C-alpha cells in the first residue's frame, strides 16, 4: 500500500502496474474498505518496501519500471510504498 497517492505520471505507466505499485491503494482507502465491510478492531503493522524496490533485482519486469520511471523517482517513491500485515475482527 501507499502512504500517499502516486503521481499520475507514475501511476499511469504500464511499468508501474507491472511492478505492482501502479494500482496500489493508499492506507486510508484500504483500511476504509475493511471498515466499510464491517470489520472492527483493525490493527496493522507496516514495513517499508524500499528493500524490494532495488534496481539490483534481476526481475525484467522491475527493470522495465526502473528504466521507464528513472532511479531518482524510484528512490523518492520507495519512501511511500509499504508492505502491510493487517488483522481485524468481524462481529
Image: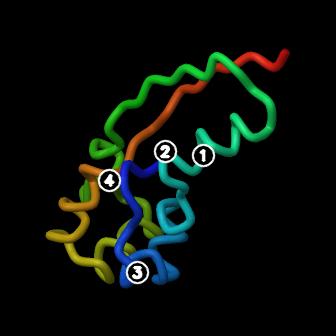
Residue under numbered circle 2: 27
Work out whether residue 70 or residue 1 is closer to the camera in this orientation and state it.
Answer: 1
Q: Residues within 10 Å of mark 3 (few under 14, many from 20)?
A: few
Q: Is residue 34 left or right of residue 72?
A: right
Distance between the Cα atoms at labels 1 and 4? 21 Å
Residue 85: percent from left, percent from top: 54, 26
Residue under numbered circle 1: 30
Distance between the Cα atoms at labels 2 and 3? 18 Å
Q: Earlier in the sequence, mark 3 or mark 1?
A: 3
- The answer to whether mark 3 and mark 1 are in CB contact below 8 A is no
- The answer to whether mark 2 and mark 1 are in CB contact below 8 A is yes
Residue 40: percent from left, percent from top: 70, 21
Label disc, if present, on residue 83 of the rendered structure? none
Question: Is 81 located above or below residue 22 in the figure?
Answer: above
Q: Residues within 10 Å of mark 2 (few under 14, many from 20)?
A: some
Disc 3 is placed on an element classified as helix
Residue 63: percent from left, percent from top: 35, 70
Disc 4 is placed on an element classified as helix
Front disc: 2 or 4: 2
Distance between the Cα atoms at labels 2 and 4? 19 Å
Residue extending furthest toward the left:
72
Identify the residue shown where x is 25% and y is 65%.
Answer: 74
Distance between the Cα atoms at labels 3 and 1? 19 Å
Front disc: 1 or 4: 1
Q: Earlier in the sequence, mark 2 or mark 4?
A: 2
Identify the residue shown where x is 44% and y is 69%.
Answer: 60
Residue under numbered circle 4: 53
Disc 1 is placed on an element classified as helix
Quarter holding the C terminus is top right
Work out whether residue 60 or residue 86 is closer to the camera in this orientation and state it.
Answer: 86
Amino acid at each position: 500500500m501507499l502512504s500517499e497517492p502516486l503521481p499520475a505520471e507514475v501511476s499511469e505507466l504500464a511499468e508501474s502496474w507491472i511492478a505492482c505499485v501502479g494500482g496500489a491503494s493508499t492506507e486510508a482507502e484500504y483500511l476504509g474498505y475493511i471498515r466499510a465491510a464491517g470489520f472492527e478492531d483493525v490493527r496493522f503493522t507496516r514495513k517499508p518496501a524500499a528493500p524490494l524496490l532495488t534496481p539490483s533485482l534481476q526481475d525484467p519486469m522491475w527493470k522495465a519500471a526502473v528504466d521507464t520511471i528513472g532511479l531518482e523517482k524510484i528512490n523518492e517513491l520507495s519512501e511511500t510504498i509499504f508492505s502491510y500485515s493487517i488483522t481485524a475482527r468481524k462481529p
